[in-house]
Amino acid sequence: DSGVTQTPKHLITATGQRVTLRCSPRSGDLSVYWYQQSLDQGLQFLIQYYNGEERAKGNILERFSAQQFPDLHSELNLSSLELGDSALYFCASSPTTGYEKLFFGSGTQLSVL
Amino acid sequence: QQPVQSPQAVILREGEDAVINCSSSKALYSVHWYRQKHGEAPVFLMILLKGGEQKGHDKISASFNEKKQQSSLYLTASQLSYSGTYFCGTEMGAGNQFYFGTGTSLTVIP
């Protein structure tokens, strides 16, 4: 158990809908990262937050947004969902801003039908 | 900027050795290695900082050649539990953006 909690584990929704994925980092970790993993795309970095502030942005679509709350949990919002958004979404956490050892949650499997 | 890994896939028999390579087109500050078993989250193996040091983790070790901008992961006397997809991750400067490689699927058979 990495100590990073992601909910829900599975999410099935329809095109055009909006969903929210939730992540609670390990106790004491200030950084939260979001990754998207598709079968043919590997692990694609979406966005990083550190202590409530956006720290780095990767290949995140404009339809996607995220935030980190004062209690350090993070939410990834995906809207106007398309079939191609179906993927496994991982959250990871680390103690500081740098990319030292990342602890990954078990992921949220999103299926857009 | 995504590092390229080779081979894409490898199948080994128990006890055999394997090498997985990770190459970047840019100068690297650090290289990280992770293993992801099927249906699970990636798990950290090791970090190598520039300086060419070699690290080990049981029978898994890695090297980092900063001049060639590449890292190699060495799996010695492979065990069934080594099966999974191995990802390298590269960082071009401390705190700079971090990219995972393309992944190498490793299967160990009895």
Image (cartoon, rainbow, N blue to C red):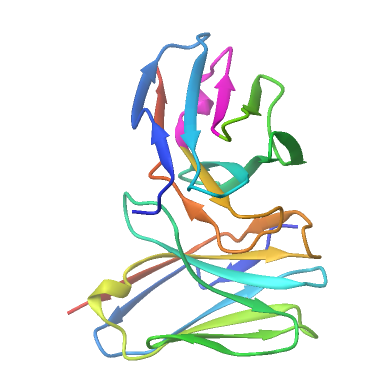
Residue visible at 44% across and 57% down in the picture: B42
Q: Is residue B31 above or below residue A76?
A: below
**Quadrant housing residue A58:** top right
Residue visible at 76% across and 83% down in the picture: B66
Q: Is residue B66 above or below residue A102?
A: below
Q: Is residue A83 magenta?
A: yes
Q: Check the picture and name the quadrant holding the N terminus of chain A.
A: bottom left
Looking at the rendering, the stretch of residues picked out in magenta corresponds to A73-88
**Residue A23 visible (yes or no):** yes
Residue visible at 55% across and 57% down in the picture: A102
Q: Residue B104 versus residue B67: which sits nearer the camera?
A: B67
Spot the residue most to the left: B110
Report the number of discs.
0
Side of A71 relative to B96 (left or right): left
Q: Is residue B101 magenta?
A: no
In x, y percent, where is residue B12? 31, 80
Q: Residue A45 versus residue A21: which sits nearer the camera?
A: A21
**Quadrant housing residue B30:** bottom right
Residue visible at 63% across and 29% down in the picture: A70
In x, y percent, where is residue B92? 79, 65
**Residue A42 visible (yes or no):** no
Q: Check the picture and name the quadrant holding the C terminus of chain A.
A: top left
In x, y percent, where is residue B37? 34, 59
Q: Residue B1 versus residue B11: which sits nearer the camera?
A: B1
In x, y percent, where is residue B1? 76, 57
